[in-house]
Amino acid sequence: MTDTSTQSGPMLAADGTPLKKSLARALRLQKMRALALIAPLLIFVLVSFVIPIGSMLFRSVENGSVAETLPLTVAELQNWDATSGELPDEALYAAFTTDMVAAIEAKKHTRLGSRLNYEHTGMSSLFRKSGRQIKKLDPAADAPFKDKIIDIDKKWGDVETWQVIKTHSVKYTNGYFLNAIDMQRTVEGAKAQPEDKQILIKLFQRTLFMSMVITVSCILLGYPVAWLLANLPARTANVLMILVLLPFWTSLLVRTSAWKVMLQQQGVINEVLVWLGIVADDARLVMINNQLGTIIAMTHILLPFMILPMYSVMQTIKPTYLRAAKSMGATNWTAFWRVYFPLSVPGIGAGSILVFILSIGYYITPEIVGGTKGVFISNRIAYHISSSLNWGLAAALGTILLAVVLVLYWAYDKIVGIDNVKLG
Amino acid sequence: MAALTPISRKPLSLVLPCIAAAGGLLGLFVGTAKDQSTLGVLIGAALVAALGFFYIAVLKNEQMAKWISIVLFAGFGFFAGGIPGVVLGLIFGWLFYWFTYWLYEGRYRARLLPYLTPGQVLWHYGFRVICGAIFVFLITPILVVMPLSFNAEDFFTFTPEMLQFKAEGYSLKHYQDFFSNNEWQRSFKNSLIIAPIATVISVSLGTLAAIGLSQSHVPGKRAIMAIMISPMIVPLIISATGMFFFYSQIGNWLEGTLGLDKNFVGYIKVVLAHAVLGIPFVIITVTATLVGFDHSLTRAAANMGANPVTTFFRVQMPLILPGVISGGLFAFITSFDEVVVVLFVGSASQKTLPWQMFTGLREQISPTILAVATILVGISILLLATVEMLRRRSERLRGLSPG
C-alpha cells in the first residue's frame, strides 16, 4: 500500500517503458497481425466480388451513350422545348449531322440505335438505315440539313423521335429502374408502360408469391422431420440424417434432372399413376413446365436448408420442459403449442429466411422445370443479359432483387447472427 | 424405462378391422389397375381378414404364419404380374405377417410409455408415417435416377423389360456414351481443372482469414465477416450479372494489354469467380472449428521456441485440419456444381459438366444425363461420408461428445 502511494510515476514494464504504453503496443501488434491475416482474402473478395457487384449497380444508372455519341446534338436539345410539339430548328439538325458523320466513322451509331431501341421500338433500324445516307452528307458544305435529313427518313420529322433522344440524353438515368417497375421515362416525366408491355411487376409478384409458397411448404414438411430427428436417440437420428444430407450434397443439376424425369407426362409419377389406374392414360397430370413443377422441385431442393437450422434449434430444447408442462395438466396439444413451439420459432425463422433468400434468386430449376408460367425474375435477368442484351435493365432488375435480399439478410443477422450459420 | 412397458395380446375385434383396412387398401390398388376398385377393396379386406383370423384363432404358430404368408403372397404376385409380382409379393407377405402379429401381440406398445392413451399411440405412429412420407419425398428423386441410367432404351421412364428384371432391359450404353463422347469428356475435364484450383485458392486464403478473425481484437469484425459471407447470401444470378460486366472488362484488359491467351484468360476468370463463391463455406467451417481451439497451445509452442510458422503447421493446423478439409469439400462441391456464374463468365471452351448437363436438359435431352447424374450422386455420397467422418473426428479431438 505504502509502495504504490510513494511511487510517483506511472507503473513501468520490465524494460522501463510505462506499462500502459507497452500494453497498447502489444494490442496494436495483435490487431495488425490479425488484419494482416485477413487482408489477402478481404482484398480478394473486394476485388473479385464486391467491385463486380458495384459495377452492376453503376451500370443500372449509367447512360453515357447518347451524350457521348451525339455531344453537339445533346447541347442543342437543351434549347428545344420538347413539350411544344414543334420540330427542332435547323441548328439542331446541323449539329445532328455533324455528330452522326463522326459517329458513323467511329461505327458507334448502331450501338446508339440499339440503346434507344430498348426505349422506343424502331430506333435501331432508323439509325442503321439513315446511317448509310447521312454518311454521304458533308457537315461543312451541304447546309441546310433539316429537309435533307427528313427526306432520308420521315421519322426524323417526327417530334417523338427527338423526344426520345432528349429524354435519354442525360448521363445518369433512372430510366432502367423505371423500366424495371413497368414505367418509362418520357418528356413529361415518369409514365406507366403500355398495358401489353407490363410484365415485370407481375414477375416480381410471382417471384415473391412462389418463394413464399415454397417457404411455407418447406416449413410444413421440414418441421415434423426436424422434430423427429431432434427427439430420436442419437444413433437413429444420425442414420436418418443421411436422408436429409444426401440431397443436400447432391448436385443441383442432378436433382433438377431427377424431377424432370419424375414429373414429365411420360415420367415416373404419371406412369405409376396410370399403371395403378388412378389416372387415365389420356388424362395424364401436367406437373412440369408450370408453377406446380417449380414449386415441387424447389421445395425438394431447399428442404434441407429448412430442416438443418430447425434441427439445430430443436436439439437445444430440453424434453423435460414438455414433461413439466404435461405434469401440470397440459394436454399434448397445449404442451406443444404453448411450450415447445415458441421455443422452436427461432429455428423456423432462420430456416424460412434462408429458404426465402435462396428461392427468390433461383435460376436453374425454374428455367428447366418452370416453362413460361413458372419462371422467376432471375430468368428475366438472364434473358436480358444473354438474349436481348439490354444490360442496363438487367442491372436494374438485379439491383432491386439485391436490395430485397439485403433487407432479408439484415433481418437474418438480427434474428440469428451470421456467426451462427452452421453447415452440415 | 420404455422397454419395461408390459405388452399384452389384443382382442380380435381390434386386430381384424385394422388388417382388413390394410388389405382393403392393397386390394384398392390391385382392383383399380383392373378397373374394379370397389370389388378390389372388398375382396382384399375379406381375404386378409380371413387369413388373419386363421393365423390367430386356428394356427397359433407365429413361424408357420410367417412362411405361409410369404409363400402365399409371392405365389399370388407371380400369378398377377410375373417376376416383379413375386418381389412385391415377398415384401407384402412379410409385411402382412409382421403387421398382424405386431398388432395382435401388442408389440406396438413395447417401446412407448405405459400411460399413453390409445389416441396418443395412434398419433405417435401416424406422425412417424408422415415423417416417413417426407423422407421418401426427399430421397426418391435421387434413387429413381440410378436404375433409369441403366436403361437400354433412350427413355426417361421404366420400360416393361426393366420392370420384369430382364437382362436385355438394362445396358451400360449411356455410361459408354459419357466416356466416349467428346463433349461430355471435355466438360468433365474442365470441371476437374477448375474446381480443384478454385478450392485451393479459397481454402488457403479462407483459412488464414478465419484464423485472423478468431483472434480476440479484430477491428470491424462484424463488417469483415459480413463482406466475406456475402458471396453465399447474394443470389447467384446477381453475382453472375455483376461478374459478367466486370470480368469481361478484366478479360479484355488481360488479353489486350498483357497479351495473354484467350483460353487461358477464360480459365482465370472462371477460377477466380468460383474461388470467391467457395470462400464463405471455408470461413464458416474453419471458424466453427476454431471456436473450441485452445489458444494457450500456441502460446505454449511459442514458449518452447517455435516460431509462428512452425506453430501454425505443427500445432494449429493438425487440430483445425478437419474443419479445413470439410470447408474445402464444400468449396469444391460449390465450384463443381456451379452453373449460373460459369454460364455468364465463361466461354464455350470452359464448358463445365453442370453447364453441359444444363444445355442437355434444356435442349436435346439425352439419357446420358442420367448416367452422369448417377456418377455425381456417387461422388456426393463419398463427399458426404468424408465430411461426416471429419466432423466426428474433430469433435473427438476437441473433446466434445460424439454427435
Image (cartoon, rainbow, N blue to C red):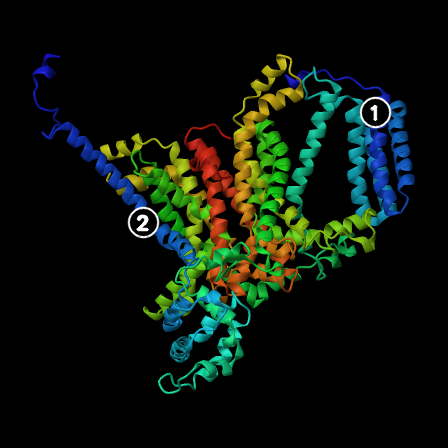
What residue appears at the point 30 percent right and 32 percent down from the top-left corner?
B297
Q: Is residue A34 left or right of residue A120?
A: left
Q: CA distance from mark 1 to mark 2?
A: 70 Å
Residue B3, position in %: x, y? 66, 19
Depth check, front residue: B266 or B394 = B266
Neighbour tally class for label 1: few under 14, some 14-19, many 20 plus, Cα within 10 Å = many
What residue appears at the point 52 percent right and 36 percent down from the top-left corner?
A350
Determine whether B303 is above or below A296 in the image.
above
Q: Amino acid at mark 2?
A: Pro
What residue appears at the point 66 percent right and 56 percent down from the top-left corner?
B149
Determine whether B394 is above or below B195 in the image.
above
Q: Which mark is residue B15?
A: 1
Task: Tell me whether the residue at label 1 lies in contact with that at label 2, contact meaning CB atoms closer than 8 angstroms.
Answer: no
Depth check, front residue: B180 or B242 = B242
Residue occupied by mark 2 = A40
Q: Which mark is residue A225?
A: none
Name the secondary structure under disc 2. Answer: helix
Q: Which label lies toward us, 1 or 2?
A: 2
Q: Is residue A169 left or right of residue A37?
A: right
Q: Chain of mark 2?
A: A
Residue B43, position in %: x, y? 91, 37
Q: Is residue A205 left or right of residue B387?
A: right
Name the secondary structure under disc 1. Answer: helix
